[in-house]
Image (cartoon, rainbow, N blue to C red):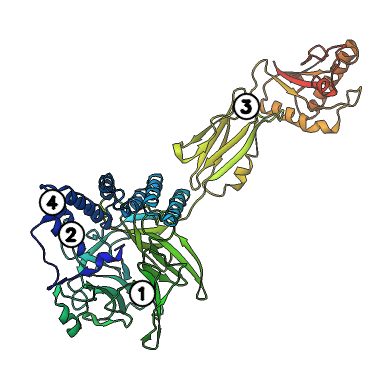
Amino acid sequence: MKNLYIICLLLTALNGVTQENNWVKEGDFNMDHHFYKEALISYDNALATEIDSSEKLHAQSQKALAYYRLFDYENAEKQYAIILKYAVIENPESWLQYGHILRNNEKYEKAIDAYETYGSYSGKYSVIDYYEKACSWSIEHKDSIQNYHIYQTNLETGGRSLGVGYFKNGLVYSQSQSEDFDIKTTFYDISFAEKENDSVFKNFEAYRGELNRSFYEGSPSFTADQRTMFYTGNASERIKYKERKRKKKGYEISSKGVNILKIYQVSLSDSGWINKKELPFNSNEYSCTHPSISKDGRTLYFISNMEGGYGGYDLYVSYKTDTVWSKPQNMGPAINSASNEMTPFCIENVIYFSSKGNMGYGGADIFKAQFDSGELVSVKNMGKPFNTSKDDFAFVMHEDKEHGYLSSNRAGTHGYDHIYGFEKFEIIYPDTIRGIAINRITGIPIRGVKVTVEPDLENVFHKIEETDQGGKIVLVLPKGKEFLVTFYAEGFEAKEIMIPATNREDIIARFGNLELIPVAKKDKIITIDKIYFDYDKATIRDESLPALDKILEYLNYHSKITVELSAHTDARGSDSYNKRLSQKRAESTVKWLIEHGVEVNRMIPKGYGESKLVNHCKNRVKCSDEDHMKNRRVELKVL
């Protein structure tokens, strides 16, 4: 029920239309009376016969329009592509409709081309500017997804959903009066389905009594006590009429022969729904439909195509004082557009509604209008997953604001409406763990650290394949599950960290500097450049203690190894002097380690002076202090 004319029956005046025995004219008759499925059959029959080229083009054009009005956007696109080869200038409106259909099929760039073609033939460039902006909006907001899960229910709509309402232990909705809904136009009765779970319903049954009549009944809305239901129905039971009797006897048929829609209310009794009453603002000249009653039963939102609106069907509101409903008020241009608005639903200070005229993804989109003390604050597109490029409408929400239902033709093709449930879920953001892998003894970042995670959840988490020169680690792990993370690199002991499912803060903090201990492999040399001595002496300075502690930790960790602990100088000074100084410094370092518990037979002090320079700074070579400093070092070699 996305374009409202689909439930407005155009009746046959006895002194009016006469159907000729001609497939094209039969198709036109069905189109005029909104029997689009039957019209398609008529035009297909016509195209299967010998007809002249003008009738053939007419039949093809009418087929395209029928698919469009059936919301069968896939077939409509194909059909418009056929007719636009021939009817470019004669019917520029077809290009506009083609652009709409391409938007419905998420072909936004092609839609812009179609709109521009329409503009070139019609001269209506302001219209084109709007629709081009709409296409750009759709592209920009394609990833605006909210944290709701959408699922399809088993409620059979017969192809057209007329909305749902919460009632007792189930839903009230409209079900088809016929099982032939796939091949012909069918009408609908308000029915009840008992809820088995959120997506499965059972015991489907149409209400009996005066509630349901021959044509369309739907769009239920209930007061808070569920004793009163407001709904939409066709005004007349007549199929044919005489114009003179319409006026004389007051048939509820418009002057144009339309069996318009009206809003009714009924009361619940032990025998069912009774006391059917028509609301006072209804008219025989325009439709009122899609009621939504406020919790206190004193504010009614609905849509209507009455005069004075902004185009198509607009949202209106009426207030009840005592027993009288006020004159409807249009809800203004911030909500209403030049196209159709539909299916309002009010809950507290919010109105949800659908619109084809506000910025959306292509078809009818669901919008949220926020009010504060009766004043409109904002109108926003609900985004995905509520909206798609197809038609999304008839949004209702449970009082908990975490569950609800909507109708949509998003699934499959041929414009078939389904009723979907939605449920809010909590977004649990994963933990992003960042750190730097460093050599625990030297403090230098480690390149080439690899990471394994158990259990390996493939795409559930992200991990670096290997650290770069800066040793950076990035690990993204989902919450709620325990993981064993192992870091390993050539020349270092592997390190395992257990990441708990919850309360990870302290563990994650350990990743700031992830320290790996070098392995104790024979002839492995570890360079320590942060052991400082007094000038021209072997006295260890206090700022050397952190580095000495690292050496002590390494020797305690590898408690069985023997090492050579060597000291080195730069090339300044004589070779013999530098060798004697370096030997004393090596011995001072060993002495400190012995004093802190390392066995004397595990260490051999060795002073190499300037005999093992690590750069070009030899005797008589001019170098900076920084370059000379690189040669002043202590090395630990595994024997």
Q: Which residue is mark 1?
A: 307
Quadrant in the picture for the C terminus: top right
Which is more N-terminal, label 2 or label 4? 2
Q: Which residue is mark 4?
A: 46
Around disc 1, counting alpha carbons within 10 Å, would you say few (fewer than 14), some (14 to 19), or many (20 or more)? few
Which is more N-terminal, label 1 or label 2? 2
Q: In the rendered image, which quarter is residue 312 located in? A: bottom left
Which is more N-terminal, label 3 or label 4? 4
Q: In the rendered image, which quarter is residue 337 located in? A: bottom left
Question: Which residue type carries mark 4?
Answer: Ala
Q: Which residue is mark 3?
A: 447
Residue reaching furthest bottom? 322
Above or below, 14 against 181 in this view is below
Around disc 2, counting alpha carbons within 10 Å, would you say few (fewer than 14), some (14 to 19), or many (20 or more)? many
Q: Secondary structure at mark 4?
A: helix
Which is more N-terminal, label 3 or label 2? 2
Above or below, 612 against 217 in this view is above
